[in-house]
């Protein structure tokens, strides 16, 4: 396609992307550098049905004046990024100087909210993404081999986890692993420990969420791989069969190289999706044991009665940077291939 | 013909009972939490809506919607049913209007004690009181020869005895769901120990001390006597546990007693469910509980006509003797004419014992939020009490700095 034609094709999408993705990201970025003005408080008398007390309230008149003068808030630079609830630069320096062993240092650092969330997010990505790819590929291969007659219903059944709303899917599993649910109670019986709970142990909660993630995301990989498998040319495969290649050798040397670009695509998308893991944490009420970066943003925006826009914006920006770093190797590789292809 | 006339007259007369508000215009849109007493309250106010538009959103996620929805201009809701804690963010952001004029003009049935005044201005009209207190299974305690516990130490001893007898595996329950609920339990227990959340006259945190440690240790003891899934259990979940007969002692909101004692569920358990005041802790004499009021506030960013219509409808309910008589067992109403029944014992005892109201401070929400996530690891046994409290203070300080309180 000539560049000019491409430009006109891309223009509407590009404009929409700038408007709905680009500008909000810029605005979030700007917001992350600002904090709220210093609160002006005053002592007043408060009376309610249980009696009167003297206590403080925010002085709204004064606050409005300050706000009108500087609506964005107080410029904070990277203050929000480096505070204890984010990168915690000062705390880490302190831990490094104070703690004796490396293990104690790591313990202290992973106790900070941002690093705690980052570790869960990365663990989730590292376990879910490869397993999704592998499982999706195996299912696609197996389904590709069964008789055409039963393929339709089987495909439908396989993509069911993707059709089910993530929240509903996680809630179903949540009830099943309850200490009185079908899985939870059976595990208690099996282990002979009435105080065992999948929901209260951190490790078990992580495992549950990761298994759920694999269950939920595999159909996506499967659908894409299955479509790609339909384009694998039959001649080389037949030739390989005649040459006596085993099934494994055929997959390794013919099928995989053929669908390789699709594998890259699926890996990219799942990495991005998994880095933003959020719904299962809410669905499993797992806030106590597992927090992800997206959950931190959500927490700053809604869980407090006081909304922390600066914190949420800073975490959002760092999530974007995190995704960029994760995707960098794949993107660089794709770019190189693109260049050699030209 | 005569029959029709009589019916018509009856209909006219029947509706005229509600028509005293005579609201001609305006639109009413209410945001409220979701529990039976609030539904009754809003339904009662609907009876006098006249020709005004009437909409209501009952949601347990009300805290998450309130500030953004009231910040918009015009705001989505004309009224928000708030409580001690949830009025604070509305005050901080200047989102609600003073009600003095409206109270003078239309609030003749409202008692002075119902008015929430801040700096001399009426900011809300309260209509019910709430607290968390003890519920116990009379049959179980009697069988085991246990007296009704008055302190949390006795609750622990009683629960251990019940567990040792093999009768129940998890004899105690409270809403320990990580987040708001768990933090609320900490607030109760900390106040029971006589703690103050902030250093006098400042927003500096003051929980990393002996009282804080004692609070955490008590929470941990109680959590060990609860269902192992306690970190995922909110009020609704422990209500279900209670109704399945798995629990003998429970700390729960007074406003939930109605649903526990209704006809649904096992009649034997319902009959044996008894209420008592909140427990004290650590030898203190004030209960480890906080007093709450629920009341209505009006949005600032809404036309005066809407505010007037909304106030008249809600004031009708907030001064309605028929409502408090009909729904006497749903809540402890602060409305004139309320006769406390057996289901109000918890709140009345709490007031008698000198329970403190939930601290209505501008920065309390940040402390509550920090507590909800930072004490979890202590309960899971992964962290010392001192470390957990240090984390809470550190998390709070960062948030308070960003928010301009420190």
Image: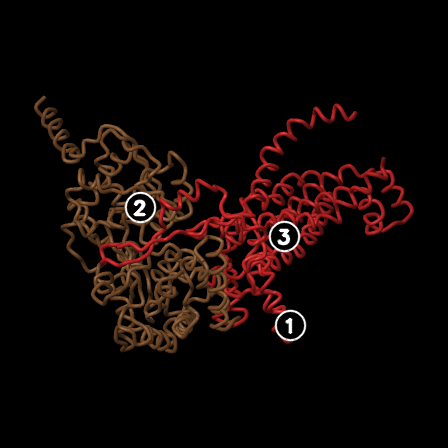
Chain colours: A red, B brown
Q: Which of B334/A216 is in front? A: B334
Chain of residue at mark 1: A
For the residue carrying disc 2, how many other residues have a C-alpha within 10 Å: few (<14), some (14-19), or many (20+)? many
Q: Name the residue located 43 percent from the left edge and 66 percent from the top edge.
A: B227
Gap between marks 2 and 1 measured at Cα: 50 Å
Question: Residue A131: x and y, percent?
Answer: 68, 54
Q: Name the residue located 37 percent from the left edge and 36 percent from the top edge.
A: B75
Gap between marks 3 and 1 measured at Cα: 31 Å
Chain of residue at mark 2: B
- Residue at the disc numbered 1: A103
The image's mark for residue B81 is 2
- Residue at the disc numbered 3: A214
On whether disc 3 and disc 1 are found on a single subunit, the reply is yes
Chain of residue at mark 3: A
Task: Identify whether A100 is placed above or below A53.
Answer: below
Left of A308 or right of it: where is B155? left
Question: Residue B234: x and y, percent?
Answer: 40, 58
Local secondary structure at mark 2: strand
Local secondary structure at mark 3: helix
Query: Mark 2 and mark 3 in contact (Cβ < 8 Å)?
Result: no
């Amino acid at each position: 396609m000539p560049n000019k034609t491409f430009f006109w094709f891309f223009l509407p999408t590009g404009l929409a992307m700038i408007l709905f993705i680009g500008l909000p990201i810029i605005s979030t970025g700007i917001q992350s550098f600002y904090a709220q003005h210093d609160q002006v408080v005053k002592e007043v008398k408060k009376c309610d049905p249980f009696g009167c007390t003297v206590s403080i309230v925010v002085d709204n008149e004064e606050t409005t004046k300050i706000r009108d003068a500087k609506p964005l808030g107080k410029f904070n630079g990277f203050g929000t990024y480096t505070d204890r609830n984010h990168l915690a630069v000062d705390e880490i320096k302190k831990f490094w100087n104070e703690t004796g062993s490396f293990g104690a240092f790591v313990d202290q650092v992973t106790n900070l909210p941002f690093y705690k969330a980052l570790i869960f997010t990365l663990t989730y990505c590292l376990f879910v993404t490869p397993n999704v790819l592998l499982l999706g590929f195996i299912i696609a291969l197996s389904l590709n081999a069964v008789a055409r007659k039963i393929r339709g219903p089987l495909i439908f059944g396989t993509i069911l986890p993707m059709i089910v709303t993530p929240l509903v899917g996680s809630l179903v599993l949540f009830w099943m692993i309850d200490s009185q649910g079908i899985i939870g109670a059976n595990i208690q019986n099996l282990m002979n420990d009435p105080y065992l709970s999948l929901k209260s142990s951190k490790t078990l909660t992580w495992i549950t969420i990761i298994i759920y993630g694999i269950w939920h995301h595999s159909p996506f990989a499967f659908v894409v791989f299955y479509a790609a498998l339909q384009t694998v040319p039959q001649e080389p495969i037949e030739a390989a069969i005649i040459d006596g290649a085993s099934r494994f050798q055929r997959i390794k040397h013919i099928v995989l190289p053929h669908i390789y670009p699709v594998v890259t695509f699926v890996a990219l998308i799942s990495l991005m999706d998994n880095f933003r893991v959020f719904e299962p944490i809410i669905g499993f009420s797992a806030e106590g044991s597992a927090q992800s970066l997206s959950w931190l943003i959500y927490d700053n925006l809604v869980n407090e009665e006081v909304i922390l826009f600066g914190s949420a914006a800073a975490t959002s920006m760092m999530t974007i940077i995190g995704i960029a770093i994760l995707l960098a190797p794949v993107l660089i590789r794709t770019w190189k291939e693109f260049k050699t292809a030209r | 013909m005569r029959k029709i006339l009589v019916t018509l007259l009856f209909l006219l007369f029947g509706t005229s009972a509600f028509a005293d508000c005579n609201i001609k215009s305006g639109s009413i849109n209410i945001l409220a939490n979701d529990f039976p007493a609030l539904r009754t309250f809003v339904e009662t106010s609907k009876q006098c809506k006249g020709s005004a538009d009437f909409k209501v959103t009952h949601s347990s996620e009300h805290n998450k919607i309130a500030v953004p929805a009231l910040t918009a201009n015009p705001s989505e809701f004309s009224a928000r049913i708030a409580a001690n804690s949830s009025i604070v963010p509305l005050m901080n952001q200047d989102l609600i209007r003073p009600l003095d004029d409206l109270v003078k003009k239309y609030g003749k049935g409202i008692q002075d004690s119902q008015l929430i005044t801040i700096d001399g201005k009426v900011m809300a009209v309260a209509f019910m009181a709430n607290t968390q207190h003890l519920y116990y299974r009379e049959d179980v305690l009697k069988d085991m020869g246990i007296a009704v516990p008055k302190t949390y130490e006795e609750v622990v001893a009683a629960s251990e005895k019940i567990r040792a007898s093999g009768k129940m595996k998890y004899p105690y329950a409270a809403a320990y769901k990580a987040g708001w609920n768990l933090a609320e339990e900490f607030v109760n227990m900390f106040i029971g120990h006589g703690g103050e959340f902030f250093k006098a006259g400042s927003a500096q945190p003051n929980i990393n001390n002996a009282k804080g440690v004692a609070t955490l240790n008590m929470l941990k003891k109680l959590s060990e006597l609860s269902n192992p899934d306690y970190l995922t259990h909110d009020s609704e979940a422990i209500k279900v546990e209670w109704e399945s007969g798995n629990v003998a002692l429970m700390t729960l909101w007074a406003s939930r007693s109605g649903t526990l004692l209704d006809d649904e569920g096992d009649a034997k358990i319902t009959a044996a469910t008894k209420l008592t005041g909140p427990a004290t802790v650590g030898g203190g004499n004030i209960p480890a509980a906080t007093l709450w009021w629920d009341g209505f506030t009006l949005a600032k960013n809404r036309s005066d006509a809407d505010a007037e219509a909304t106030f008249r409808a809600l004031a009708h309910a907030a001064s309605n003797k028929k409502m408090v008589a009909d729904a006497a067992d749903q809540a402890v109403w602060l409305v004139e004419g309320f006769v406390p029944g057996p289901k109000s014992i918890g709140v009345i005892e709490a007031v008698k014992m000198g329970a403190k109201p939930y601290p209505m401070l501008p920065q309390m929400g940040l402390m509550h939020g920090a507590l909800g996530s930072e004490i979890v690891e202590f309960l899971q046994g992964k962290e010392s009490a001192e470390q957990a409290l240090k984390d809470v203070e550190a998390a709070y300080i960062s948030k308070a700095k960003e928010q301009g309180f420190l």
